Image (spheres, rainbow, N blue to C red):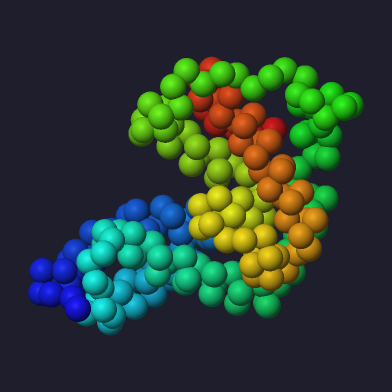
Amino acid sequence: MPTADTVPSALDLERHRPHLMKFARLQLRDESAAEDAVQETLLAALQGRERFAGQSSVRTWLIGILKHKIIDHIRRRSREQLLEPLADELDPDGPRAYFQEDGHFLEPPQQWQDPDQALQQHRFFEALERCLEALPKNSARVFTMREVMGMETGEICKEVGITPTNCWVLLHRARVSLRACLEKNWFSGGAPTIG
């Protein structure tokens, strides 16, 4: 049962808007749609704030609501328009440039000195975010649904309207592109670009 101490005020909810906008922009790639999703999230949270039990942080609770609003938006959008063809996502030879004929890496991935420390650094997250923003829209959407939102392949395929094979291809391409972008622009310095 929520107490007066756990019920967030409208001001408490509003201060999370920048973080929610960043999350929504990354997933939706559309400023207007991201603003709508965040607005719907804050409205739903405000209307249901008495149900907030305080078992998680307010931000975690809001992100949970936002994920549902983003999925609703993707459902509406997928009914309205077809996704771009997969062939346009990336140059098909791009990911192959990292592998030998037998599937092994041409050059092994660079060793991270201390992954825990790197992940905690604010600049790493900024570089990762810029690399995600540089991905093609469909690859970024599928990658974020899988790796950030934790959705299963079947759910993603249903929401986006693709086959499991297409989903796996998009995830593979996104991972290879992110690896290349981070190696080029984080581990060796520079401004993130993919390609």
Q: Is residue 39 left or right of residue 72?
A: left
Q: Which quadrant of the view contains residue 142? A: bottom right
Query: Going 36% across and 33% down the picture, which residue do you hit?
Result: 120
Outermost residue, left direction? 4
Q: Is residue 152 visible?
A: yes
Q: Which quadrant of the view contains residue 84? A: bottom right
Query: Going 48% across and 33% down the picture, which residue do you hit?
Result: 127
Q: Is residue 160 visible?
A: no
Please provide percent x and percent y for residue 106. Answer: 77, 20
Please provide percent x and percent y for residue 52. Answer: 25, 73
Residue 35 vs 106, above or below: the answer is below
Q: For the N terminus, give its image quadrant.
A: bottom left
Residue 69 vs 106, above or below: the answer is below
Q: Is residue 104 left or right of residue 175?
A: right
Q: Nearer the viewer, residue 192 or 168?
A: 168
Query: Going 74% across and 51% down the picture, which residue do you hit?
Result: 168
Q: Which quadrant of the view contains residue 8? A: bottom left
Query: Going 89% across and 26% down the picture, which residue do you hit?
Result: 101
Q: Is residue 27 left or right of residue 117?
A: right
Please provide percent x and percent y for residue 141. Answer: 61, 56
Q: How many marks on residues?
A: 0
Q: Nearer the viewer, residue 31 or 58?
A: 58
Q: Nearer the viewer, residue 188 or 62?
A: 62
Outermost residue, bottom direction? 47
Q: Is residue 94 left or right of residue 44?
A: right
Q: For the C terminus, give its image quadrant.
A: top right
Please provide percent x and percent y for residue 162. Answer: 75, 64
Residue 130 vs 113, above or below: the answer is below
